[in-house]
């Protein structure tokens, strides 16, 4: 696995010594991470495989997918020999730390289990929150305290645009239908009255 910039042109190839002569093309990974406050960032691959919030290991990562297509069959392997499958990264689980227990406050499995060590009780695990990334603004991290969820990069629910619309309702004193029909001079009168109202 290799991180590339959004503005890169062409098809990047693997730079590992075992691939140099074959010019093996790199493919985009299908997963990203998002929260319900609109942040979107790279999936925390290193943090997930090392089970640490700030891993120091920078050895190459490998994405190994089996034939079943399930998340449990996709394994991330680090050069330090640590490995972890992606089982449950897109699921939500009840928030064990919330008194309200509302769906909005529910922790995702990704946030709840990212730092989980083998054999550790779920209640003792620290929560890994959203990194506050806004990659479209070249801000890979920021500040956020929301649960992070894995999303498919090509999914239609990754982005919902915010649409605003307005309707102008003229005052009751304004005559909208002149006896002779709509003329250019009447349209100019309408516009003039609208501007006068706006300025008042």
Image (cartoon, rainbow, N blue to C red):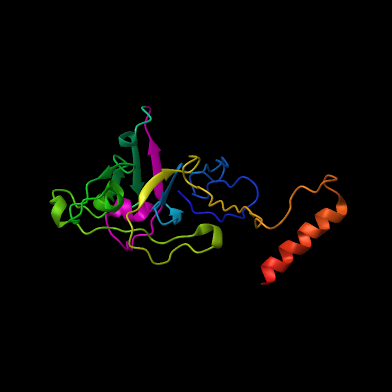
Q: Is residue 88 visible?
A: yes
In the rendered image of this protein, does residue 155 appear above or below residue 58? above
Could you say which quadrant of the image residue 198 lies in? Answer: bottom right
Q: Nearer the viewer, residue 199 or 81?
A: 199
Q: Is residue 80 visible?
A: no
Which residue is located at x 74 percent, y 53 percent?
A: 175
In this picture, residue 140 sits left or right of residue 73: right
Question: Residue 66 colored magenta?
Answer: yes
Instruction: Where is residue 101? Give x, y as percent.
Output: 21, 51
Number of numbered callouts drawn: 0
Q: Residue furthest top?
A: 68
In the rendered image of this protein, does residue 54 appear above or below residue 28? below
In the rendered structure, which segment of residues is drawn in magenta? Answer: 44-67
Quadrant holding the C terminus: bottom right
Instruction: Where is residue 180? Give x, y as percent.
Output: 85, 45
Which residue is located at x 45 percent, y 60 percent?
A: 133
Q: Nearer the viewer, residue 182 or 145?
A: 182
Could you say which quadrant of the image residue 88 lies in? Answer: top left
Q: Residue furthest bottom?
A: 200
Q: Nearer the viewer, residue 137 or 103?
A: 103
In this picture, residue 150 sits left or right of residue 108: right
In this picture, residue 49 sits left or right of residue 132: left
Instruction: Where is residue 142? Give x, y as percent.
Output: 42, 66
Question: Residue 100 colored magenta?
Answer: no
Instruction: Where is residue 13? Give x, y as percent.
Output: 57, 46
């Amino acid at each position: 696995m290799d991180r590339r910039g959004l503005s890169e042109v062409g098809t990047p190839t693997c730079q590992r010594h075992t691939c140099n002569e074959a010019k093996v093309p790199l493919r985009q990974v299908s997963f990203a991470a998002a929260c319900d406050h609109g942040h979107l960032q790279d999936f925390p691959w290193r943090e997930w495989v090392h089970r640490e919030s700030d891993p120091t290991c920078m050895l190459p990562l490998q994405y190994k997918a089996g034939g079943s297509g399930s998340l449990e069959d996709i394994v991330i392997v680090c050069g330090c020999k640590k490995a972890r499958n992606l089982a449950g990264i897109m699921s939500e689980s009840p928030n064990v730390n919330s008194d309200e227990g509302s769906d909005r406050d529910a922790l995702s499995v990704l946030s709840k289990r990212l730092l989980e060590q083998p054999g550790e009780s779920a209640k003792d695990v620290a929560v890994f929150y959203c990194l506050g990334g806004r990659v479209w603004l070249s801000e890979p991290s920021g500040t956020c305290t929301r649960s992070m969820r894995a999303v498919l990069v090509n999914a239609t629910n990754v982005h919902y645009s915010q649409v605003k619309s307005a309707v102008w309702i003229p005052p009751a004193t304004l005559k909208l239908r002149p006896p002779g029909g709509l003329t250019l001079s009447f349209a100019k009168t309408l516009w003039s009255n609208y501007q006068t109202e706006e300025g008042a």
